[in-house]
Structure formats: C-alpha cells, structure tokens
Amino acid sequence: MLEKIKDKLKEVVAIAETCPEKYQVKCFEILLSSLVRAEVEVPVTGAAVTTGQAGEKAVPAFFAHQNITEEEWQKVFHFDGTTYPIIVDDLKETSKSKKQVKLALLEGIKVLLTSSVATIVKGDLMELCKKYDAYDSSNFAMHMKKQKSLFLAKGDNWSLTKPGEKRAGEVIKELSQ
C-alpha cells in the first residue's frame, strides 16, 4: 500500500501546487487523505469494504451500511472472488412487474459491489428477468419508469438512487429469510 501511495504522492504534490498559495496546504492534505482512504477502502474488485476488529473478514461497505449480515447476503449473492452472481431461488413475488423491480434492485447492487457504481444494464436485466420468468416484453420499460424514486434512466440503462439502494438492502434482508 505504501508503495502505491508513494508513487502517487508526486501527482498529489503537483495538483496541490496548481492551487492558489493560500490553499495549497489544505489541498494537499485533502488529496493525500483521499488517496490513503482509497488505498485502504477499495480492494482489487472495486467494492469498498469495511473492517472491524483484527482478524475479522472484510465486508463490502454496502452490506455494512445496510446492516446486512454475511449470512443474509450469502443467501442472495455468491461471491466467487471477483463477482457477486445472484443465486436466490425464490423472489417471493408472483407478479412479473414486482419480480422485475426486485431483480433490477439486486442487479444494481451486484454491479455496485464490483464497480462502485450501481448501474443496471438493460440487456443484463432482460436476461435476468427471463431466467426468473419475470420478463414482460410489452411492459418491461414501463415497470422501470414507474419506479422513479428507485431508478434513474441513463440512456437505455438505469442507475439506482439512494432510496433504491436502501430498498435493495430491504429486499436482500427479505429474501434471506
């Protein structure tokens, strides 16, 4: 970790030096702090993690912030070392629209855990919905548009809002029961 920080320190100094003189020290402190925090919190997969006491496992930050235990999230996702495929069998819904919304929430979290951005790719969601018998081709886009508080349209794709992330946490807890 120190070697990585050491390599980037010159960049931090160069950026700080571009600031007006009275802000250079504060800029340097902020950039250095951010650099150190990034090296500590972001593993190779890109998912922020938090750690507890010495010897405890690292936990993806999303799960920690949502108070989701390892036992709970492992009933919904399987961490294979780099990705978090969705493994839950029963979405505990009968309507296709409600299944689709739950799958979109889970897909957004799956992507968030590996890339730090909760993006839902339309094609990936469509395939996931087909797998869970939740695909309704004539109403697919409408189901997503109705959930404006949970999803923001980004071209053909969507991103989770903060309320969407919170709802996803609730869904993970619900599905793990």
Image (cartoon, helix red, strand yellow):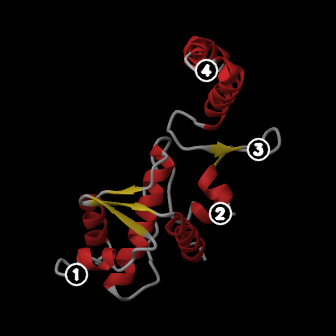
31 versus 118 height, above or below: above
Viewer-side residue, 57 vs 9: 9
**Alpha carbon distance from label 2 to label 4:** 41 Å
Residue type at numbered disc 3: Glu
120 versus 168 height, above or below: above
Q: From the image, tell me which residue sits under label 4.
A: 20
Residue type at numbered disc 4: Pro
Q: Position of residue 164 (x, y in %)?
A: 49, 68
Quarter of the N terminus within the rendering: top right
Q: From the image, tell me which residue sits under label 3.
A: 56
- Residue, x 66% and y 20% (percent of image)? 24
Residue type at numbered disc 2: Gln
Is tag 3's residue or tag 4's residue first in the polypeptide sequence?
A: 4
Identify the secondary structure beneath mark 2: loop
- Residue, x 54% and y 75% (percent of image)? 175
Is tag 4's residue or tag 1's residue first in the polypeptide sequence?
A: 4
Check disc 3: other Cα within 10 Å, few if <14, some if 14-19, many if 20+.
few
168 versus 159 height, above or below: below
Check disc 2: other Cα within 10 Å, few if <14, some if 14-19, many if 20+.
some
Q: From the image, tell me which residue sits under label 1.
A: 139
- Residue, x 50% and y 59% (percent of image)? 77
* Mark 2 vs 4: CB contact within 8 A: no
As drawn, the label of residue 66 is 2
- Residue, x 57% and y 60% (percent of image)? 74
Is tag 2's residue or tag 4's residue first in the polypeptide sequence?
A: 4
Task: Choose mark 3 or mark 1, whichever is in front.
Answer: 1
**Alpha carbon distance from label 3 to label 1:** 45 Å
As drawn, the label of residue 84 is none
* 153 horizontally vs 31: left or right: left
Viewer-side residue, 138 vs 158: 158
